[in-house]
Image (cartoon, grey):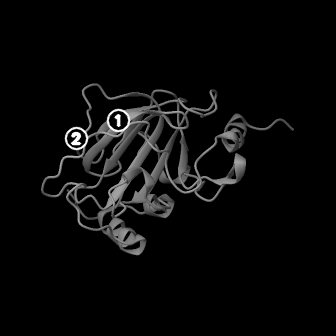
Amino acid sequence: MPRPPLLLALLSLAACARPHYSAPVPASFPPRVAHAGSVAARPSAVTSIEAVDYLLVRGLELPVAGMTRVQLRDTFDEGRDGGRVHRALDILAPRGTAVLAADSGRVLRIGANPLGGNIIYASDPLGRVVYYYAHLDGYQPGLTAGATIARGDTLGYVGTTGNAPKDTPHLHFQVMRMPADGRYWDGEPINPFPLLLLVRTASQP
């Protein structure tokens, strides 16, 4: 029996290589400017347990427009080639679908790398958590590093850049705790799947 197109698309994601524990290291790093409440000004990082508790209070928005919770699939612990573990969610959507900010905060970096293609790193308002959006087809016009964003803002658009299968547009969405050294691309991953299943009830800035 022929496999449904959606199943074939999901299976093809297994070929999508990912780093074992963290998002790809940026090819170049933007200057870090310390100011009150910024990532650079933070003296220490929170533990993973603290980060999860913090996110349970804040809640996360679904990062792809038109997506419902029942459509999500937990790909966090799936294997990838080279013995890697995914440590992120792949959210399938048509090319060009808006990628939305899962949380309010600040854009840390906009750029590209071989694995993620067009990528965005962002943090929450207190710089405790890092959000990584990858394989973007493009960025929201006018969005720049350092920009303040609100949850639900359009950041970019679903695509297949980087090592994503070219016939399977999707968002690679990763959540990490902010390391004490401020190396935001190298934080410990947190599975966002159960967090995204929760309906946010409190209003968080």
Question: Is 139 placed above or below 78 here?
Answer: above
Is there any visible trace of residue 62 in the rendered image?
Answer: no
| Type of amino acid at the residue the image marks with label 2 | Gly
Crowdedness near tag 2: few (<14), some (14–19) or many (≥20) residues, C-alpha within 10 Å: some
Query: Image point 46% across, 62% down: which residue?
Result: 188
Cα gap from disc 1 to disc 2, whole angstroms: 9 Å
Most foreground residue, 5 or 156: 156
Q: Residue at the right extreme?
A: 1
Query: Image point 33% across, 47% down: which residue?
Result: 122
Measuring from the top left, give residue 109's x and y in whole percent: 33, 40
SS at badge 1? strand
Crowdedness near tag 1: few (<14), some (14–19) or many (≥20) residues, C-alpha within 10 Å: some
Q: Is residue 35 left or right of residue 6?
A: left
Q: Is residue 195 left or right of residue 88?
A: left
The circle on residue 146 is: 2
* Quadrant in the picture for residue 44: bottom left
* Quadrant in the picture for residue 98: top left
Please name the residue that numbered disc 1 is placed on. 110
* Quadrant in the picture for residue 100: top left
| Type of amino acid at the residue the image marks with label 1 | Ile
The circle on residue 41 is: none
Measuring from the top left, give residue 3's x and y in whole percent: 79, 38
Most foreground residue, 83 or 27: 27
Q: Is residue 186 left or right of residue 81?
A: left
Q: Earlier in the sequence, mark 1 or mark 2?
A: 1
Measuring from the top left, give residue 69's x and y in whole percent: 48, 53
Is there any visible trace of residue 43 in the rendered image?
Answer: yes
SS at badge 2? loop
Q: Residue at the left extreme?
A: 36
Image quadrant for the C terminus? bottom left
Question: Is 123 placed above or below 197 here?
Answer: above
Query: Image point 42% across, 47% down: which residue?
Result: 132
